[in-house]
Amino acid sequence: MAERPNQLWQTDMTKVWAGSSVGWDYLVSVIDCCTLDIVGWDLSLRCRTQEAIAAVERAVLEQMADGSRNYGLVLNTDNGTQFTATRSLEVLTRLGITHRHTAFNHPDGNGLIERIHRSLKAEEIWLNEYPSLEEARHSIGRWIEEYNHDRPHRAFKNRTPHEARAGFAQPQPLTKTEALSV
């Protein structure tokens, strides 16, 4: 498990029924395994590598203003083609992110993000029929914001994921020696 923020992230894609006027959409989410906050996400009409990359790049921009190359970040994914495509692997390499994927047919290997998706669907998506993709993005974004900032976790002594992240000293890139040993 992760001992500090921006050390280990999990990402996954899930299919979302957004209502008869919108149809099926695809949500890619990224969670920090240390603080359990959702650090990046993308909702779109397609489920391509491009959308998976967009969620990771947004997470990097939000969490690591100075870039991700020296953090020693590991991204855990399943074996979906969006995450194992050459283009995806090239982007992760360019960002200095180590890619690790779960064993085939082993969803527990990505259990944190799987659990978040289940909660998001049960508490938000399955209860609503969105009139547009933009409304779906807005409502899902609001749920993610509330999850990160308003939902306490027992694992953090009833602090929210946002408060847990703030409880760490601002994560710093690894030193050159630390980076070489990763």
Image (cartoon, rainbow, N blue to C red):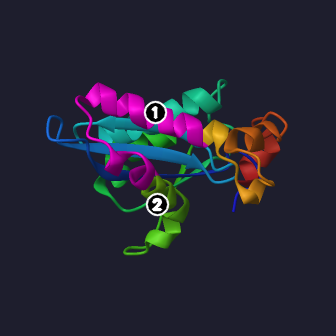
Which of the 4 image quadrants contains residue 177?
top right
For the N terminus, which image quadrant?
Answer: bottom right
Helix, strand or loop under label 1: helix
Q: Earlier in the sequence, mark 2 or mark 1?
A: 2
Residue 8 percent across, percent down from the top left: 63, 52
Query: Residue placed at 48% from the left, 32% from the top?
Result: 142
Q: Is residue 148 above or below residue 158?
A: above
Q: Secondary structure at mark 2?
A: helix
| Residue 131 at x, y percent in the picture | 22, 30
Circle 1 packing at 10 Å, graded few (<14), some (14-19), many (20+), is some
Cα distance in 3D space between marks 2 and 1: 17 Å
Residue in the image at 41% along x and 55% along y: 122
Q: Which residue is depicted at the point 77% across and 54% down?
A: 156
> Where are the magenta residues, as a range?
120-147
Q: Is 99 located above or below residue 166 in the figure?
A: below
> Please, is residue 72 above or below residue 131 in the view?
below
User: Which label belongs to residue 58?
Assistant: none
Q: Are marks 2 and 1 in contact (CB under 8 Å)?
A: no
> Would you name the residue on which mark 1 appears?
141
Decide which of 128, 135 is in the foreground and name it: 128
User: What residue sits right under mark 2 in the picture?
Assistant: 114
